[in-house]
Image: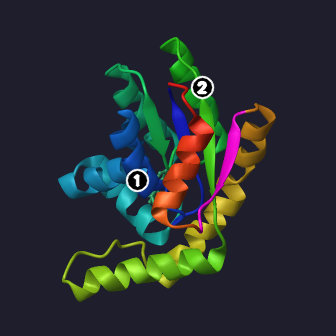
Amino acid sequence: MNIILLGPPGAGKGTQAGLLTQSRGLVQLSTGDMLREAQASGSAMGKIVADVMAKGQLVTDEIVIGLIREKLEQGGTGFIFDGFPRTLAQADALEALLAEMGQGLDAVIELRVNDEVLVGRIVGRAEEARAVGQPVRADDNAESLKTRLMAYYKQTSPLIGYYHAKGLLKGVDGLNEIDTVATDIAALLGAAG
Ligand code: ADP
């Protein structure tokens, strides 16, 4: 089965995607992780995206669609898309790529949270990392976070209506404990896949 996790920054997409890889053997495709890897590798593309990401803006559709295409072309079945698609153009591209593979989407899980909690989680994540001397994400600061939330509402949240219209959208309360959210997602996905 192929699933999208949708929600604003800090909603817990990465955490839940990680749990789904364990419980269902799905392959996690996180464009945020791919872009951070590109940055760490010092590749030309990594250099292009670094500034955009640090500001909290969206990287171009062309770049992220290219990254996803590369992964899907390696074949396989059973993907969990985390942080992708983030625009309608990306949603269209994903549908086309899956169709080429004779596959489709089974569900889009929206993690519902509120902004105050998001800010608290992200600021907390940065503080915890700092306290133990771990690297802090360049975009985990108040300024970038504001831009990331705006990007979510302007560019990504229209996907909620889009997937609802397609009959694929399922919502869970992302304010609950991690285990409860995971149980709720499992119940939504049921025995399918
Ligand atoms: P978060 O969900 O906490 O914002 P991500 O790791 O998903 O974290 O994304 C970090 C940054 O990477 C985004 O703010 C954006 O700059 C870039 N990015 C990730 N995925 C996409 C995408 N699908 N389209 C455009 N930019 C993306």
Mark 1 residue element: helix
Nearer to the camera, 156 or 188: 188
Name the residue carrying label 2: 95
Main secondary structure found in the magenta portion: strand
Position of residue 62 measured from the top left corner of the image (x, y, whole percent): 49, 39
Q: Is residue 70 left or right of residue 81?
A: left
Residue found at x 53% / y 64%: 9
Callout 1 amino acid? Gly
* Magenta residues (range): 168-175
Q: Is residue 26 above or below residue 34?
A: above
Position of residue 16 measured from the top left corner of the image (x, y, whole percent): 45, 52
Position of residue 15 measured from the top left corner of the image (x, y, whole percent): 41, 57
Marks 1 and 2, how far apart at CA: 20 Å
Name the residue carrying label 1: 32
Does the rendering let one see residue 113?
Answer: yes
95 is within the stretch colored magenta: no
Residue found at x 62% / y 81%: 116
Q: Is residue 174 above or below residue 2?
A: below
Callout 2 amino acid? Glu
Give neighbour class at mark 2: few <14, some 14-19, many 20+ (Cα, 10 Å): some
For marks 1 and 2, the one nearer the N-term is: 1
Mark 2 residue element: helix
